Image (cartoon, rainbow, N blue to C red):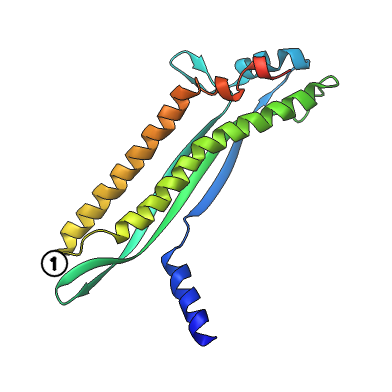
Amino acid sequence: MKYFILIVLIISSSYSKPLVFTNYKYYDIYPTNKHNLEESMDNSSPLRSFGSIRHGTVSWKIAYKYKRERKNNICKISETKTKVYIEYYVPKIGKTHKPVKGTKRVFNRYYIILKDYLKKHSDFSVQAANEIENKLLEIEDINNCDELKTNAKKLASNIIKKYKKKNKDYEIRTYEGFLEGIRKEKLF
């Protein structure tokens, strides 16, 4: 039994998951009925880029740390840890606003679609963090610790770029969420 516990501890410490911190920010909307829900979001949304209005967005950052060991003049990475910071910016019906019957139900249905779509975007950050944790441990041991640090930074940067490209490709592939239901054709 003692050996089993020791093996579980060794395995769990080498296969850690990134720590994920999620934050939500909101902008208020004031729809008069379920038929002008999209118009209300378009008018209230501060999320605009290149003439396009978005109803929600997600941004993410990855922080990573690793431990270096130096033995017999060889420097290696012995442990890694990543943190993912995800921030969603989405609409909500204003606190003092009393929409007509049915509006809140339609909005809640749309909100779930929007959150699912944005979650797919944020999933890329967690995948990137997992890959960083695993790939940093695979960096070749060398005798120069400064060079190891440079290699680790370059590797992590390339992984983040790769997943930011996947994120952008997903955005293009879904026509900025249109194919996922992020527009009025799927609201009713």
Q: Crowding at label 1, few (<14), some or many (≥20) Cα neighbours within 10 Å?
A: some
x then y, percent, for residue 48: 50, 20
Q: Is residue 122 above or below residue 54?
A: below
Image-based side of 126 in relation to 46, left or right: left
Name which residue type carries label 1. Asn
x then y, percent, for residue 8: 50, 74
Image-based side of 158 in relation to 31, left or right: left
Image-based side of 92 in relation to 6, left or right: right
Q: Quadrant of residue 36?
A: top right
| Residue closer to the observer: 133 or 2 | 2
| Residue closer to the observer: 31 or 7 | 7
**Residue 37 appears in the picture as rendered:** yes
x then y, percent, for residue 114: 62, 29
Image-based side of 156 in relation to 39, left or right: left
Q: Residue furthest right?
A: 101
| Residue closer to the observer: 29 or 128 | 128
Query: Quadrant location of the N terminus?
Result: bottom right
Number of numbered discs on residues? 1
x then y, percent, for residue 125: 45, 43
Q: Residue furthest bottom?
A: 2
Q: Residue at x 48, y 58 (%)?
A: 17
Q: Residue at x 49, y 15 (%)?
A: 52
**Residue 93 appears in the picture as rendered:** no
Query: Quadrant location of the C terminus?
Result: top right
Q: Quadrant of residue 99?
A: top right
Q: Is residue 131 above or below residue 173?
A: below
Q: Residue at x 52, y 86 (%)?
A: 2
Q: Residue at x 14, y 63 (%)?
A: 144
Q: Quadrant of residue 178?
A: top right
The residue where tag 1 is placed is 143
**SS of the residue at dot 1?**
loop
